[in-house]
Every structure is written in C-alpha cells, then in structure tokens.
Amino acid sequence: MKRLETVFENFLWNSRFIVLIAVISSLLIAFAVFYVATMDAVNTIYYALQYGSPGMDGAERAALRASIITHVVEIVDGYLLATVLLIFSLGLYELFISKIELAENSETSSNVLLIRNLDDLKNRLAKVILMILIVRFFEYAIGMKFSSAPDLLMLSGGIALIGLALYLSHIADDKRS
C-alpha cells in the first residue's frame, strides 16, 4: 500500500510539468507579439518620415499625424501585451517548475521577473493589464469626436476613473510593502 501511495504521489508531483505547455505557448506568443509590434514600429517610422514631405497639404498632414499617433498607441499596446505574456510565462515556470536562478542571481534583473507566489504573479499581471487598459482608453479618446458637452463629460469621467484606478493600485502596493 505504501508503494502505491509513493507511486501516486510521484505521479501527482510530476504532473506539474503539464504547465510547460502554457509556459512555452505563452513565450512563443509573446515573441510573436513582440515581432508584430516591432514591424508596426518600423512601418510607423516609415510613415513618420513622409510627414515632412513638402508636397503634402495641411489636411493630408493632419490625417497622417492622427494615423501616426494612433499607430504609436497600438505599438505601445502590443508591447505591453507581449510583456504580460512574458511575465505570465516566467511566473508559471517559477511557480510550478523551478526557480530561475539566473534571474535571482543577476544584478541587472528586475524584481518584476521574480515571482515568489501566485499573488506576485497576479499583482504583476494586474499592473500591466491596467496599463494596457489605459493605453486602449487613450487610443479611443484620440479617435473620439467631441460634438457635445456629454461627450466631454464622458471623457473627463473616464480620465477620473483611470486616475482613481491608478491611485487605488498604488495604495494597494504600499500596503503590501
């Protein structure tokens, strides 16, 4: 009976390696999103170089400027999403498989990449996701057409709620420290 228990406990313990599927998948997707965001950045630089073209009239220049700003916000959003996936991948690995000794011993390593428990992973992901939501809000705000006072009130209410979310997350960080 003891031998069966030992075999079953070994099986349970080793079943944690199934998490490697999520770790590798998240890492590959993070690389893909970094690639997409980088290609978007390269294309945006190309369009930005056209901004100074002397043959462009004011309306074309304004449209190009709006397009460039929108693309920059999308690039930031892409890099933040890739960062979420990277943190998620590293966090799952550290929680379920093994500590990453290189990260712990490195003088240049950020504490963001050191995950000690599930709450650490959750808090780090929540911060980056909050930043993604803020960037997304900014992206929509840039494209909004303000035609009435309620439009401006909704924008200012959204900004106030973002400020409140940042304030509350900062207070929560201070309490954890």
Image: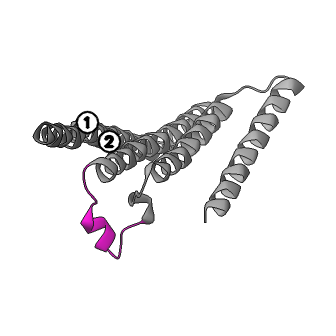
Q: Quadrant of residue 171?
A: bottom right
Other residues around mark 1 within 10 Å, as few (<14) / some (14–19) / many (≥20): some
Q: Which residue is nearer to you in this view: 21 or 18?
A: 18
Residue displayed at 48% across by 45% down: 76
Which segment is the magenta one?
Answer: 97-110
Other residues around mark 2 within 10 Å, as few (<14) / some (14–19) / many (≥20): many
Q: Amino acid at mark 2?
A: Ala
Q: Residue furthest front?
A: 1
Q: Is residue 103 magenta?
A: yes
**Contact between labelled residues 2 and 1, with CB atoms less than 8 Å apart:** no
Residue displayed at 25% across by 50% down: 97
For the stretch drawn in magenta, the main secondary structure is loop
Which is closer to the viewer, label 1 or label 2?
A: 1
Q: Is residue 62 left or right of residue 110?
A: right
Q: Quadrant of residue 156?
A: top right
Q: Is residue 120 visible?
A: yes
**Which residue is labeled 2 in the image?**
30
Rendered location of residue 16, percent (x, y): 24, 41
Q: CA distance from mark 1 to mark 2?
A: 8 Å
Rendered location of residue 61, percent (x, y): 57, 37
Report the quarter where the N terminus lies: top left
**Which residue is labeled 1 in the image?**
25
